[in-house]
Image: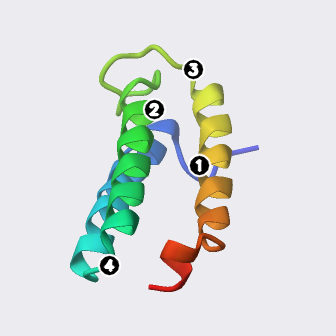
Amino acid sequence: MKKAVSPTAHGVIDYVFSGLQAATPFLLSLNPATKKTYAALSTGFTLVNALTNTRAGIKPVIPFRSHQKADVGFLVGLGLLTFAGFIRND
């Protein structure tokens, strides 16, 4: 079965997503706790991406399969953040 997105394209998309994740709370003038939370998540997301063994990675330490598992964790975490009062109330 052909993959919808190649590992390299996935890495590029992740870098763009990380940038959006870091910038959006600032562009929307959200509260400081939200800005710090999303900046930390963006940093972690970027670090995992940079260390993944793909052509988009900087230092190939993490297998792409492990990167995919980390993505699931990040996405679940982002979803759960909608229940955090400091984010939900803003």
Q: Quadrant of the C terminus?
A: bottom left
Which residue is pictured at 38% across the width and 33% down the height? 47
Q: Quadrant of the N terminus?
A: top right
Which residue is pictured at 41% across the width and 53% down the height? 13
Contact (Cβ within 8 Å) of mark 1 with mark 2 = yes
Q: Is residue 37 above or below residue 47?
A: below
Find the residue positioned furthest to the top.
Answer: 61
Tag 2: Cα neighbours inside 10 Å, few (<14), some, or many (≥20)?
many
Query: Is 77 on the left or on the right of 27, as rendered?
Result: right
The kind of secondary structure element at disc 1 is helix
Residue 30 marker: 4
Identity of the amino acid at label 2?
A: Val
Give the distance between the C-alpha atoms of the residues marked 2 and 4, in whole angstroms. Answer: 26 Å
Tag 4: Cα neighbours inside 10 Å, few (<14), some, or many (≥20)?
some
Q: Position of residue 39 (x, y in %)?
A: 33, 53
Seen from the viewer's position, the closer of residues 51 and 33 is 33
Tag 3: Cα neighbours inside 10 Å, few (<14), some, or many (≥20)?
few
Give the distance between the C-alpha atoms of the residues marked 3 and 1, in whole angstroms. Answer: 17 Å
User: Which residue corresponds to mark 2?
Assistant: 48
Identity of the amino acid at label 4?
A: Leu
Tag 1: Cα neighbours inside 10 Å, few (<14), some, or many (≥20)?
some
Q: Position of residue 37 (x, y in %)?
A: 42, 57
Contact (Cβ within 8 Å) of mark 2 with mark 4 = no
Nearest-to-viewer mark from 3 and 4:
4
Mark 2 vs 3, N-terminal side: 2
Identity of the amino acid at label 3?
A: Pro
User: Which residue corresponds to mark 1?
Assistant: 74
Nearest-to-viewer mark from 3 and 1:
1
Mark 3 vs 1, N-terminal side: 3
Mark 4 vs 1, N-terminal side: 4
Q: Position of residue 32 (x, y in %)?
A: 30, 67
User: Which residue corresponds to mark 3?
Assistant: 63
